[in-house]
Each structure stands twice: as structure tokens, then as C-alpha cells.
Image (cartoon, rainbow, N blue to C red):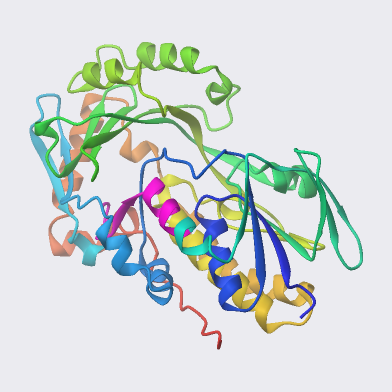
Amino acid sequence: MAHRNVLIAGAGIAGPALAYWLHRRGLAATVVERAPAVREGGQTVDLRGAGRTVARRMGLERALQAHATREEGIRFVDRADRVKAVFSSGAFGGQGPVAELEILRADLSRLLYEETRPYTEYLFADEITELSQGDERVRVTFRGGAERDFDLVVAADGARSRTRDLVFGDAADTRPVGLTAAYFTIPGEPRDGRWARWYNAPEGRVVTLRPDNRGTTRASLSFLSPPRGDEQHEKLVPEAQKALLHRVFRAAGWETARVLAAMDTAPDLYLDRVSQVRMPRWSHGRVAVLGDAGYCPSPLSGMGTTLAFTGAYVLAGELAHHAHHEQAFTRYEEVLRPYAERAQDLPPGVPRIAVPRTRAGIRTLHLVLRAAARPRVAGQLNRFLVPPADTFALPSYSL
């Protein structure tokens, strides 16, 4: 093979997962990450279907289960915290709104880093600022001033990938889906229990609380926003974002006052427009995209982490089985793109169907969710409640 030295941008989930599989295939990986260390923030993520199968093939499933949040399911509640609908973590064969294997993003990232660092070069507090592709290598310039040559480069640094944009320019279509969301950690309280809780407030607002395995609670505030509007709340400074959230969620009821008060001192507030990333091609020369950088399905899909794991597995497998990177990249896209596109195909009406603007709409949502517990109705609602995680047959790549 002529591609034994691969530079990966991003030390989140997709990047280290790729480093793992490259090592298994006899290839060397270097991972560059803007942050000074493995990031500790982030919400709960899950592994479903093919993603969980990849984790099992990595020998990580037991470690992941040991770090699981152990949520018992999700309860949809009203202003008085009365349960209007409920789904256990075992609902829909463990593939419902709360999967059987839920883990904090930071814990998953840390596990992958610890697994791969003995044989992977990690460059923290640095990033790619320039790439120059030649016939044989890619010359990379780093923010710290160093220049190095690599056989291939993979952008795995998230939906707003700077590495991808250096190579593909505006070819990446980042599509907002009409929802803005803020995520942060707040102190846990006994009443949080072991169930996630989802509260709908009028005017298209949602507050969720999810207990973790650290004694804290992961909170989110979401509200409807124009899919292609000019608002770019994610570019506001943190204090302005907090002021915005106080204004939007004022008098929303339920636990909102507690959540807003804790948000003011939360160290990990992250606000963004919920978006998908679609690209006409996943490679250009010796550079490819992986995970959210190339085919982010949005958190609404429940498939982001699963696609990161399966994408890393397929990309490494194809690189190991083709002498030329062009063939490997082409095959990687042929194998995985249909799965990624199914994940991005959100059900009709999402997110508005789950974020009604009126009290009548909220009552209707609760009625539909209660009905979903009935087997006959559940089958008709599978597309809304069950991500398409089991629609992909993993290839077998011999070692």
C-alpha cells in the first residue's frame, strides 16, 4: 500500500475510532486536535445497530457498558411534572428514543483515546492551517508553524470542520433543520432520578433533563428557528447566548427556572443551530471526510455516533484492501453513503412535529406518544421513534 501514513483532524469520536482501525490494518495514524486535551464537555450519545457491532469488534463493548449513564428511559411530562407518555430504554428492542447503551460523549472520547494512544501520535493544541496536495504526498502546515508530509489526510473534526473547508471550500452544504439548541451540565437533584425528562412549552420550546453517571444532569434548551433564517445565534459571545436563552425561555414553566439559573454558571454551554452536512463527494485527491464532517445527520436522527463508528471501520477497511487511495475512497463512499443518507432522511414534519407551538399541539403530541406504546400503533410510528441503525450490513474485512 502507498498510503501507510494518515493524518486525522479531530480527536473526538470518529478520529480516534479511525486511528484504531488503521492500526488494526497495519497503517499509522497521527491525530491533530485544536483543544489542549481530550474534550470533557458534551451530552449523552448512543451506539445502535451497526455502530454497536463495530464497538463489539473493537472489544470495547464491556468498557462502554461500564461507563453507561444507565438511564431507564424517557418520560414526556407537563408543566406540573405529570407523566404524559413514557418509553423505557428497552422499548422498540432497545432502539427507541433512549437506547440501551447511552454514554457521555466525553467518556466515549476518553475511552477511545486511552485505547489508541499507545500506537497513535496525538498533537493537541494544534490544527491544520494549510494543505498542498502532490502526486505522492500531502504537505501540511500546522498552526504551530511545523510542516510535515503525509500520504493521506482525513477530516474528522465535526460538522463545522475547518479542515474540510480548506480542501472542499463551499462544497459542503450545511443545512439547518429549523431548531436551535443549547446544551450544558447542571447540578443533579434527587428528583432527577434515572429517567430522562422531556418538557414541551408553548411557542415551540423544549427543555430536557438527562441524568448522567457522574451525579450531574445534562440539560438542553431547544426552540424552533427559521431553517434558512439570518439568525446566527451560535456566533454570539457566551453572555449574549445566555441572555437570548433567558429571553426565549422566560416563564416557560416546569423546571425551566432552575435550568436557566444553573446555565449562568455552567462551564460547558454550547449553542448551535441543529444542522445536517451533505456533500456531493466525500474525497478530493488525497483528502477524505469522515463522520459529521462529511455526513452529519443532526442530533435529531440519533445516528451521529453510529455513523462515526461505522464510517471509521469502513474507511480503514477499504484503505487496507486497495493499493490506490482513489479506489479506497470511492469504495468507502459507495458502501457507506446509502446508510448515511437513510440516517439523514428525517421523518416528515421533524422537528416541528416534536416541538409544537400551541398548547393544543402539545396535547396532541402527548396523545400520539401514549398511543405509540400500543404494538399496533407502534409499528406505524417506528420511523419517528426508531433510528435506522439496523439497516446496514457491515462488510467483513479480513485482518
Q: Residue at x 32, y 61 (%)?
A: 64
Which image quarter is the C terminus in? Answer: bottom right
Q: Residue at x 55, y 88 (%)?
A: 398
Give the vertical position of 307 relative to 107 (above or below). Answer: below
Give the vertical position of 236 relative to 94 (above or below). Answer: above
Point out residue 276 in the picture as x, y percentages from the top left corner.
Answer: 55, 46
**Residue 321 occupies which quadrant of the picture?**
bottom right
Q: Is residue 209 visible?
A: no
Q: Is residue 268 left or right of residue 170?
A: left
Point out residue 220 in the picture as x, y percentages from the top left corner.
Answer: 33, 32
Q: Nearer the viewer, residue 351 or 8?
A: 8
Kindly give the residue lying farthest to the front in the view shown: 118
Please state the extent of the stretch shown in magenta in the rendering.
Answer: 95-112
Give the vertical position of 385 relative to 74 (above or below). Answer: below
Kindly give the residue lying farthest to the right in the view shown: 135
Which image quarter is the N terminus in? Answer: bottom right
Query: For residue 101: magenta?
Result: yes
